[in-house]
Image: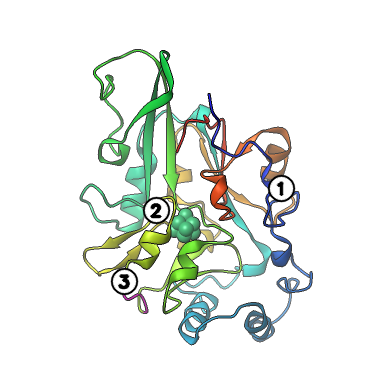
Amino acid sequence: MQREANERHPAHRANGAGIDGIPARERVGEPGGPQPRGATRREFLILGSKMFVMTSVAAAAFEHVLAGVPEAASTYNIVDHWWAMLIDIEKCIGSGHCVRACKLENNVVDEPFYFRTWVERYHVDPLDMDHPTVDSPNGGIDGFPESYPDGTTTGKTFFVPKMCNHCADSPCTQVCPVGATFRTNDGVVLIDKEYCLGCRYCVQACPYGCRYIDPRTKTADKCTLCYHRLTKGLQPACCETCPTGARQIADLRNPDDPVHAFLRSHQIQVLKPQMATGAKVYYSGLDGSVR
Ligand code: SF4
């Protein structure tokens, strides 16, 4: 079977990420990287202005993050973290708990087709292993029926949760004409709704289909890694609710995070590695047929 997914450790990515998966330019204390813990917010702002070439609107959005938007978190030090997610395909049972929790937590539009995270089921016919069928009824929010779309009940099957990959080199942020979408210093791609024009450039630029236009606000929307929870020391809702622990939030800047041991001892893949986006949703056990 042709493998599309990246078989290499994320530490070997072409974007210069090291053994912990953090790009060199994001390493604390390194030239161009964020300042060590303890610097004042003002110093951080000055450094931030040197680090990023941002439009004034993006800078304003960044200021919002520093100011604690979407939620105040006085003890949260943005440069101490570099967020990623681990998804263990062998543990995912397609229950849809994560999809439901995400919709509730983030007030995602109820109708089908609007998801910040969703689950796809891949069904591989042993006689045609290179052409799996994929279904995701209502994003997998209610689980999956026993039979497959082709009417069969046999063959290999597995579930693939999907979401924004919070790319280190995100194409979506590069195309936004007003800088309304941006990556924070702790590695989370966010959208400032006040500035978003709803132009759809980012929706088209995302190679993973992770963005949509919220019909209520007419602005772009997608996973925030539950940033409002992360900054309070809580897990994203999808991780917290997963009954099997298939989804794990990972702080690559925390040397005590078990993610480091996991990355050293497992083969990790990312979706569409050929896009070189620096995707930070790392999959373990991902079949090569996954698109
Ligand atoms: Fe942007 Fe898509 Fe990457 Fe998320 S997955 S950061 S929306 S390009």
Q: Does mark 2's beta carbon lie closer than 8 Å to ligand 1?
A: yes
Which amino acid does the dot numbered 3 rest on? Cys
Using the rendered image of the protein, determine whether residue 37 is visible from the camera's viewpoint.
yes
Residue 283 image-quadrant placement: top right
Mark carried by residue 210: 2
Q: Position of residue 148 (x, y in %)?
A: 28, 22
Closer to the observer: label 1 or label 3?
Answer: 3
**Which residue in the structure is indicated by mark 1?**
11
Residue 184, above or below 248: below
Category of crowding for the residue at label 3, using alpha-carbon neighbours closer than 10 angstroms: few (below 14), some (14–19), many (at least 20): some
Closer to the observer: label 3 or label 2?
Answer: 3
Secondary structure under the numbered disc 2 in the rendered image: loop
Q: CA distance from mark 1 to mark 3?
A: 35 Å
User: Front-most of 243 and 125?
Assistant: 125
**Which residue in the structure is indicated by mark 3?**
199
User: What residue lies at 64% left-to-right and 61% top-to-bottom?
Assistant: 81
Secondary structure under the numbered disc 1 in the rendered image: helix
Secondary structure under the numbered disc 3 in the rendered image: loop
Q: Which residues are magenta?
A: 195-199
Which amino acid does the dot numbered 1 rest on? Ala
User: What residue lies at 55% left-to-right and 37% top-to-bottom?
Assistant: 5
